[in-house]
Amino acid sequence: MHLMKHLFITTLSLFSLADVSGQKMAYNGFPSLVWPKLYDVTYVNDRDERGEYQKLVISESARALKGKVVVLPGYMVPLENQTSSDRIMLSSLPLNACFFCGVGGPETVVEVRLKKETPYIDQPIEVKGVLKLNEADPDELPYILEAAEVIGTVDR
């Protein structure tokens, strides 16, 4: 099973144990006009072949960004145990508070498909790419940046 799917299924299982209905997260990361729109999600009860779960519903403000080039600041999360890759996750929260550590929801991370392999950077970065929305495949993250590039580091 692909690592991304394995991580997502594992965390989705853990995430589904928490009652997130009605919760809204406040953006506490770097100043960004995009992350708050991506955070604007709701959840509805749904069911698939694996059972019941709370399905993420993307807001109209995030939908308005579909297919557009956006710049997101955040923290690089390697998908595999490598020192460089052309696919990473970008978390709006520091790694000790990111989605896979149990604090944020799936709306706080974006899968990033980079144009070229990039070394792992342990400080905050900015990434630019075309935003794709995913509501159909629960094995993928809700947000994906395609044709992306790291445009630099962010001063803390």
Image (tube, rainbow, N blue to C red):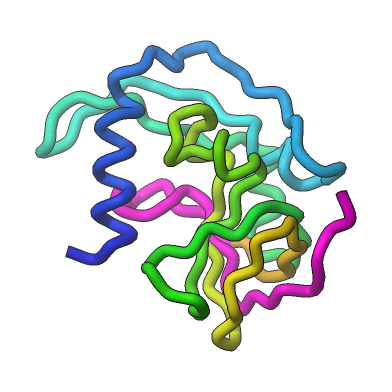
Q: Image height check: is 119 above or below 137?
A: below
Residue depicted at 81% across the width and 43% down the height:
30
Q: Give the x, y percent position of residue 106.
A: 48, 39
- Magenta span of residues: 132-156
Residue depicted at 60% across the width and 81% down the height:
118
> Does residue 143 belong to the magenta stretch?
yes
Query: Residue 59's quadrant in the figure?
Result: top right
Q: Residue 148 or 96: which is nearer the viewer? A: 96
> Does residue 91 belong to the magenta stretch?
no
Q: Residue 17 or 80: which is nearer the viewer? A: 80
Residue depicted at 73% across the width and 31% down the height:
27
Query: Residue 51's quadrant in the figure?
Result: top left
Q: Is residue 140 left or right of residue 120?
A: left
Q: Image height check: is 78 above or below 63?
A: below
Q: Image height check: is 50 above or below 115?
A: above
Q: Residue 110 or 95: which is nearer the viewer? A: 95
